Amino acid sequence: LTMDWLHGRKLLDFKGSNQEHRNQVARNMFRAWYVPFYTYGIIHGDPHLGNYSVREDFTINLLDFGCIRVFPPAFVESVIDLYKALRDNDESLAIAAYKTWGFKDLSKELIEVLNIWARFVYAPIMEDRVRPIEETNATAYGAETATKVHSELKRLGGITPPREFVLMDRATIGLGSVFLHLKAEINWYKMFHELVDDLDVKAIGSRQA
């Protein structure tokens, strides 16, 4: 076990900071999670309040690498494909993306329920404007949508979520909660496109190797 001392403050210490400082912390958190994902297909799956701290320059100390997953390049591409499918109302591309994620036995009704969740998760990157991560003033990020999706899936007989989906979803919702705590207002669309517009999926495999 190798350890080092890192200086940093708890995220909640920044809740009273000015808007620009909170936005900067949020931007750095976004990049800390998603640059590794779109560059190497790797994600830290456990962004709870104890697994990072904030340095004096608002950069991030990332801690506890016990919940890490390496995704094949095709999975990374499918995350982007699902975004495109929702943006363009392309049902066939959405189905292909869900299958690449590992979902099986997808009926039309199941696709519609999964899309409820997907539209919620992808909502912040769908519009080219500055906005909070959640615009309904929910106290728990995603709780209302998750309850609705759970109820619909139960009605349809349930579904077995792939491991890849569970880890990716956990990271996304955990980060959403961070951004909610910070009351960050950012152009999430712009940050997302900065990472994916020139993405070479084949290069992800080369970097992993």
Image (spheres, helix red, strand yellow):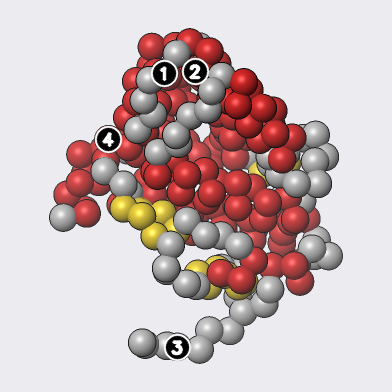
In the image, residue 75 sits, relative to residue 69, either above or below, namely above
Question: Horizontal placement of 175 versus 137: left or right?
Answer: left
Q: Dots 2 and 3: beta carbons under 8 Å?
A: no
Q: Nearer the viewer, mark 4 or mark 1?
A: 1
Q: Upstream in the sequence, badge 4 or badge 1?
A: 4
Q: Upstream in the sequence, badge 2 or badge 3?
A: 3
Residue drawn at point x = 49 percent, y = 18 percent:
111
Residue 117 placement (x, y as % from top left): 59, 29
Q: Dots 1 and 2: beta carbons under 8 Å?
A: yes
Q: Dots 3 and 1: beta carbons under 8 Å?
A: no
Q: Dots 4 and 3: beta carbons under 8 Å?
A: no
Residue 84 placement (x, y as % from top left): 45, 22
Reading the image, the residue beneath label 4 is 74
Reading the image, the residue beneath label 1 is 106
Tag 4 secondary structure = helix
Residue type for callout 4: Ala
Residue 189 placement (x, y as % from top left): 56, 35
Q: Upstream in the sequence, badge 1 or badge 2?
A: 1
In the image, residue 200 sits, relative to residue 81, either above or below, namely below
Tag 2 secondary structure = helix
Q: How far apart are labels 4 and 2 at the CA level?
A: 20 Å
Residue drawn at point x = 80 percent, y = 34 percent:
136
Residue 111's disc is: 2
Reading the image, the residue beneath label 3 is 4
Q: How far apart are labels 4 and 3 at the CA level?
A: 35 Å
In the image, residue 5 sits, relative to residue 205, either above or below, namely below
